[in-house]
Image (cartoon, rainbow, N blue to C red):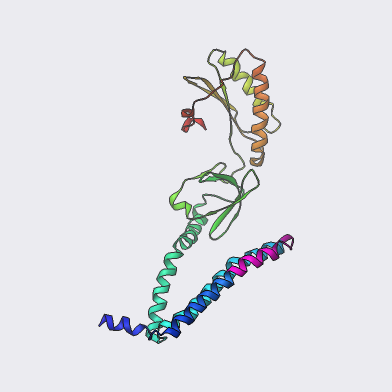
Amino acid sequence: MDSERVVGLFRNITTHTLIEAAAVVLAAMVLVWMSQKLLPWLGGRLHSSRRHYVLALIPTIRILVILAAVAWIVPLFIEPTVQNTVAILGAAGLAIGFALKDYVSSLLAGIVAAYELPYRPGDWIEVDGSYGEVKHIGMRVVEIVTPDDTVVFIPHHKLWTGLIHNANNGGASLMCVVNFYLEPDHDAHEVRRVLEDVALSSPYLKLTKPVLVVLDEQPWGTRYRIKAYPMDPRQQFQFISDLTARGKACLRDMPVRFVRFVPEQTNGPDSH
């Protein structure tokens, strides 16, 4: 009985049907190829946003051509009855649902993010190695701008599977850490005092937040870390550069020596 239903879905396939289907496939391939050749050529002769609009048409035209070809070919092989149409639409719905599961997952994660607030506009976050300031939170993705002025779109579904590092978590304070690596034979108290003075004299320092200089001993030497806050999170890179440059200058005037090589195993949890 089931085999009869399956057979009833299909029409009698003739040579004419096969030729027509092959012609439709060939025409679709030609149209897609032409769009991939002509539109970039046209976009190269336009400027500003017009070029981007033209280039954005390439995937749109490809999808429309494929859908048109499928809509033409399917009735050639399948009898377009109500029962057959319902069966085809059901199978297509399952296929589309499976294909869009990540998109739907991102939409649901976006709703969760609206309540849990793992990031907000103005936060500095890191997801899968991409670090930057949150500029826009959409329904499906969060848009961040990296220090290199690159826009990165991160799907919300990373909430389910990845770690999200939020440096300021909705506040105006963002801790910066600057590392110095010295050979062990030196006056640690004097080095700490000098590095504290370096941080306290920075024009970017947020005076209402504490300044800490911590150190730990390693087999290769001593690691010093200045932990301080800039006035504005957007100044973090100027702040780090200022502390690094002036800290090195001050340490060079002291009887200390910098470590020439730091083993990779120091890049663990305590390295931040």
Q: Quadrant of residue 48?
A: bottom right
Nearer the observer, 15 or 43: 15
Q: Quadrant of residue 29?
A: bottom right
**Residue displayed at 42% across by 73% down:** 92
Say if residue 207 shows up in the picture.
no
Nearer the observer, 187 or 257: 257
Q: Is residue 188 above or below residue 172?
A: above
Question: Does residue 195 appear left or right of residue 83 in this picture?
Answer: right
**Residue displayed at 42% across by 77% down:** 89
Total numbered labels:
0
Residue 39 part of the magenta-drawn span: yes
**Residue displayed at 37% across by 79% down:** 87
Nearer the observer, 62 or 190: 62
Residue 223 part of the magenta-drawn span: no
Magenta residue span: 33-48
Q: Is residue 141 above or below residue 190?
A: below
